[in-house]
Image (tube, coloured by chain):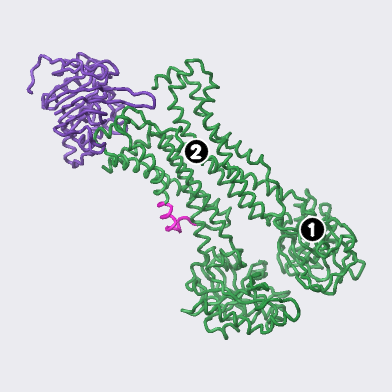
């Protein structure tokens, strides 16, 4: 019996190519997408999962509290000696590891390489699990002059082969030192909170960096993340209690001193310690990430929802088309019943056909997922692997079969219910006129309208952000990292060397590239907490960036005090202190440093992302350091300027490689996440409407074939081609209009919430939603037209004979 | 074998009630070959469907093989139908996606007959209807006459006591029609009871008796000159 059904189903599917094609393609699209999303979610949830001690590894966080006891924020940075103290004082802590993440320049065979180096205590390999390729990991970091490489970093820097014992030159501050390769590890999986390619001994830090040496004994400077390994069987609650009490022990009189000085009004302590499980780190949006950004878990679930939605759309197609086809198969069902088939046999047969279809969809989906995985990786910035996740594959297979059953069961139930005489006479049909069909079609189109509106609005908002007047001109500015060299000499050198060139419009410098990092200061001025983002700049920076000076003046190199005790602030700063731009000029910034004088006020500029309001900002020269030289080129001259820059850098230093970015790109980085989501929604919307239209295509075919006789009669009676097309298209058009009325408000609500995340947002005009509806209508009508035109221009005699 | 008393069937839509059969009482004994004739819409097909247990009467009694079946549920009728009744339709009603062999095998599959026995019986049925040489063909590759022979093979494969034929020659030319009628006659001579709806007086000649229906009533019963055992 089984083989009979299988043979029959296989021949049937092969015969009804359009029907089969639509169902399989729709299911394949949906399942492929679901497979990718499932692998992504699994990837997101298995950060650092390979460490044997995962359930015992925690990061120590300092938790700053508000006076009412609520959490103000987490900080993972700690004093140099906290780790030693915890090992000594905390009975549950077996091991501690301190980290520091720094860019370091290596010289290998005369070539310079800048590498992101993770400094870690020797206990690192006792706590975390890695595979050694060469060398003994347990002893690999014991010598302060040791370096551990991943296999790919060893290949890249030193070429193939065993590099143990090779010595490399490393530049600390301004001189080169020797380090020796002691181990090579197999490349770790990419989903880790602690990614590294080059690791060096933490012990080395105070020996080579003055700023670390100065902080070795200090409990006031917090710079180093600390991870701990709890003893086996240790209880998290009691370990947390102990570490909280140790916080009070290490900072005994903070609360009372704070109350005395007036900056703390709470009953309890102003800060405490918490242990954050390593396994939780990646998906906690309330704490800072490890050495990579955390991920908002809601994104995973939004993706999950989209995948599910498209799967539902594909299942709706399946149900609708199978019901539509049932009319064609009425005779067969009647015969089977007359020959002795019971309801159960008919249901089994239809269920089996659905399952076969689902299996084909599954095969297509996995193929599609394999093809689309590289695209997904580039969009999400991860390294997903389908074959490495057998669990996910099993889940997807189960989803495929369940979808087949779910989508096929309703038609099977309905079809098997009919009496054999009804079926034999072809008197039953479940076409597009039933309420269920209409409801399902409306659901499909409403989802399409909502997703398309989402894609349109998200693109528009990103364009809106990019076109916003930022208050300065970021175009064609090359941001050169000073890379540990003498920055003032570098800027002078670039000015001398590049300044006279025709393509160069100016050279300047600042401490942080805009949108790349922030240095914000918080201080108490009297009873008021003041906050400002501080940029240390070259004197000509305001003019260089094209800022609008509203009052006062810019920095004047001729005035000695301008370089030591003068600041330029923005409007937001003046507002915060209760001044107009005019009043602000000449005021002193109370209780900040040596109380510098405000010499000028610039118009508010968006120095951070437009997600945020403009906050108070100060430009100063007094901090005496710059980390970036800025070169503005003319738009046509950029390639030549880059070539000259390379040359000028080579003349300036042989100790560091040239590293540069474009300010435009740095600014765009702030919207990377938004752009990514716009793309994901855009792709989903396209897939959704594709799946919906495939279903519509099939349904239109069925509608036309069912109405062939009616169309023939109408034509015999004188109906024109247009009126026949209208006849067929009208019912679908009405459905799309209803769907727009349902989908648009949903999209309006969702997009409103998304836009609330921006301080600068476009207006949600109704025409976005009309446009989405019109687009869906257009696509739907084009789809239907394929069939309606065919029906309208066919010979009426043919269509009459058909019946 | 078949005994109906005042059998009636009415179809209802929202506004119209159509009476297809009105108080039909007939009696058909085992081994009989009975034709049912009458103009279009007289209720021939409705009667055949009810006799074939594909449909239930609105009123009256129908005793099939000694069992009152007028009040049975669809499920019970389906159970009784299996293996007891074979059907031959005007439009053949072969399943397009199944080969000749598979079409004929279908009733045995639903009866749960074992594979070896199925092979034997399908083979015998195909031999009997002289269509064995086409057993791996699909219906659309056959002529109308060949298709109807397959349909007859399918109707007899389960050895039913009763075969119901609804205008079996309606879609065939006279040569093929004659062949099918001879086939039915042979089956009848081998002991199968046959009830056949037809428009053709020539076909009716093959039967022992003709029941004339008009507007849902039996108007006359003509006995053919041939003798048959009661």
| Residue visible at 48% across and 31% down in the picture | A700
Residue A309 on image: x %, y %: 51, 47
Which chain is mark 2 on?
A: A
| Nearest to viewer (mark 1 / mark 2) | 2
Which residue carries the number 2 mark? Answer: A441
Can residue A251 be seen in the rendering of this structure?
yes
Quick check: marks 1 and 2 in contact, CB under 8 Å? no
Q: CA distance from mark 1 to mark 2?
A: 57 Å
Choose between B173 and A763: the one closer to the eye: A763
* Relative side of B68 to A522, left or right: left
Which chain is mark 1 on?
A: A
Palette colour of chain A: green
* Relative side of A346 to B51, left or right: right
Residue extending farthest to the bottom is A88
B212 lies above or below A512 = above
Q: Residues within 10 Å of mark 1 (few under 14, many from 20)?
A: many
User: Residue A387 magenta-drawn?
Assistant: yes
Choose between A109 and B64: the one closer to the eye: B64
Which residue carries the number 1 mark? Answer: A631
User: Residue B189 magenta-drawn?
Assistant: no
Q: Residues within 10 Å of mark 2 (few under 14, many from 20)?
A: many
Dot 1 falls on a residue whose secondary structure is strand
A26 lies above or below A48 = above
Residue extending farthest to the right is A558
Tags 1 and 2 both on a single chain: yes
Residues in magenta?
A385-398
Palette colour of chain B: purple
Residue A593 on image: x %, y %: 82, 74
């Amino acid at each position: 019996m089984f083989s009979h059904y299988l043979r029959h189903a296989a021949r049937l599917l092969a015969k009804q190519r359009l029907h089969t094609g639509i169902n399989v393609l729709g299911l394949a699209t949906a399942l492929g997408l679901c497979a990718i999303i499932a692998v992504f979610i699994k990837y997101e949830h298995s950060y650092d999962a390979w460490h044997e001690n995962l359930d015992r590894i925690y990061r120590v966080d300092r938790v700053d509290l508000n006076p009412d006891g609520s959490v103000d924020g987490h900080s993972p940075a700690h004093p140099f000696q906290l780790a030693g103290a915890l090992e000594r004082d905390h009975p549950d802590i077996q091991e501690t590891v301190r980290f520091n993440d720094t860019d370091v320049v290596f010289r290998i065979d005369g070539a310079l390489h800048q590498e992101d180096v993770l400094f870690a205590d020797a206990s690192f390999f006792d706590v975390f699990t890695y595979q050694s390729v060469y060398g003994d990991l347990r002893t690999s970091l014991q010598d302060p002059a040791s370096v551990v490489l991943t296999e790919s970093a060893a290949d890249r820097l030193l070429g193939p082969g065993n590099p143990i014992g090779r010595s490399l030159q490393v530049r600390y501050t301004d001189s080169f030192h020797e380090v020796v390769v002691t181990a090579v590890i197999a490349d770790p999986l990419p989903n880790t909170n602690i990614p590294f390619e080059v690791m060096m001994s933490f012990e080395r830090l105070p020996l080579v960096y003055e700023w670390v040496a100065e902080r070795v004994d200090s409990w006031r400077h917090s710079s180093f993340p600390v991870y701990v390994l709890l003893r086996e069987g240790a209880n998290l609650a009691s370990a947390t209690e102990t570490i909280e009490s140790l916080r009070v022990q290490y900072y005994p009189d903070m609360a009372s001193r704070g109350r005395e000085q007036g900056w703390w009004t709470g009953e309890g302590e102003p800060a405490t310690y918490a242990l954050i499980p390593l396994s939780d780190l990646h998906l906690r949006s309330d704490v800072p990430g490890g050495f990579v950004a955390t991920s908002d878990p809601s994104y995973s679930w939004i993706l999950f929802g989209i995948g599910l939605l498209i799967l539902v759309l594909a299942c709706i197609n399946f149900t609708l088309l199978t019901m539509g086809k049932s009319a064609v198969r009425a005779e067969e069902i009647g015969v089977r019943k007359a020959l002795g088939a019971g309801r159960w046999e008919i249901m089994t047969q239809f269920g089996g056909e659905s399952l076969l279809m689902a299996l084909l969809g599954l095969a297509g989906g996995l193929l599609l997922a394999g093809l689309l995985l590289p695209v997904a990786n580039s969009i999400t910035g991860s390294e997903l692997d389908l074959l490495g996740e057998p669990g996910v594959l099993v889940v997807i297979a189960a989803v495929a079969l369940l979808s087949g059953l779910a989508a096929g069961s309703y038609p099977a139930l309905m079809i098997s219910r009919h009496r054999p005489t009804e079926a034999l006479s072809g008197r039953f049909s479940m076409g597009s006129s039933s309420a269920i069909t209409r409801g399902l079609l409306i659901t499909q189109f409403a989802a399409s309208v909502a997703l398309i509106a989402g894609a349109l609005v998200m693109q528009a908002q990103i364009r809106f952000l990019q076109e916003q007047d930022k208050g300065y001109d970021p175009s064609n500015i090359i941001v050169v990292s000073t890379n540990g060299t003498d920055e003032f000499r570098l800027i002078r050198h670039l000015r001398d060397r590049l300044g006279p060139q025709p393509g160069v419009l100016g050279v300047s410098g600042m401490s942080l590239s805009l949108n790349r990092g922030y240095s914000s200061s918080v201080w108490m001025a009297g009873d008021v907490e003041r906050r400002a983002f501080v940029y240390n700049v070259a004197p000509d920076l305001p003019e260089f960036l094209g800022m609008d000076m509203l009052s006062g003046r810019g920095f004047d190199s001729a005035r000695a005090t301008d370089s030591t005790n003068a600041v330029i602030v923005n409007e937001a700063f003046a507002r915060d202190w209760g001044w107009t731009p005019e009043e602000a000029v000449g005021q002193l910034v109370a209780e900040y440093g040596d109380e510098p004088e405000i010499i000028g006020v610039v118009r508010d500029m968006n120095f951070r992302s437009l997600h945020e309001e403009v906050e108070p900002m100060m430009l100063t020269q007094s901090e005496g350091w710059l980390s970036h030289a800025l070169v503005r080129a003319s738009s046509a001259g950029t390639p030549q300027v880059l070539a000259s820059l390379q040359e000028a850098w080579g003349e300036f230093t042989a100790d560091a490689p040239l590293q540069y970015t474009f300010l435009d790109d740095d600014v765009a980085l702030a919207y990377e996440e938004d752009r990514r989501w716009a793309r994901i929604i855009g792709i989903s919307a396209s897939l959704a409407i594709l799946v919906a239209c495939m279903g519509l295509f099939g349904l239109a075919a069925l509608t036309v074939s069912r109405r062939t006789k009616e169309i023939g009669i109408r034509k015999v009676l004188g109906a024109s081609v247009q009126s026949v097309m209208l006849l067929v298209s009208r019912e679908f058009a009405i459905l799309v209009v209803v769907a727009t009325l349902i989908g648009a408000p949903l999209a309006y609500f969702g997009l409103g919430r998304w836009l609330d995340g921006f301080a600068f947002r476009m207006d949600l005009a109704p025409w976005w939603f009309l446009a989405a509806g019109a687009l869906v209508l257009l696509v739907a009508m084009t789809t239907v037209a394929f069939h309606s035109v065919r029906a309208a221009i066919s010979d009426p005699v043919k269509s009459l004979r058909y019946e | 074998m078949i005994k109906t008393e005042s059998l009636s069937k009415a179809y209802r839509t929202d506004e119209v009630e159509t009476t297809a059969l009105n108080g039909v009482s007939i009696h058909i004994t085992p081994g009989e070959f009975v034709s049912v004739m009458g103009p279009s819409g007289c209720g021939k097909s409705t009667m055949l469907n009810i006799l074939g247990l594909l449909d239930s009467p609105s009123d009256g009694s129908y005793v099939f093989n000694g069992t009152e079946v007028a009040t049975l549920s669809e499920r019970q009728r389906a159970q009784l139908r299996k293996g007891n009744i074979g059907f031959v339709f005007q439009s053949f009603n072969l399943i397009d996606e199944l080969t000749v062999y598979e079409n004929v095998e279908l009733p045995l599959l639903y009866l749960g007959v074992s594979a070896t026995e199925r092979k034997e019986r399908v083979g015998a049925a195909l031999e009997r209807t002289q269509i064995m040489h086409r057993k791996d063909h699909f219906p659309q590759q056959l002529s109308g006459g060949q298709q109807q022979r397959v349909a007859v093979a399918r109707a007899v494969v389960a050895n039913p006591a009763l075969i119901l034929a609804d205008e079996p020659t309606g879609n065939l030319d006279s040569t093929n029609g004659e062949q099918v009628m001879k086939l039915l006659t042979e089956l009848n001579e081998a002991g199968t009871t046959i009830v056949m709806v037809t428009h053709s007086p020539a076909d009716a000649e093959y039967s022992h008796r003709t029941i004339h229906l008009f507007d849902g009533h039996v108007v006359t019963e003509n006995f053919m000159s041939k003798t048959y055992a009661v």
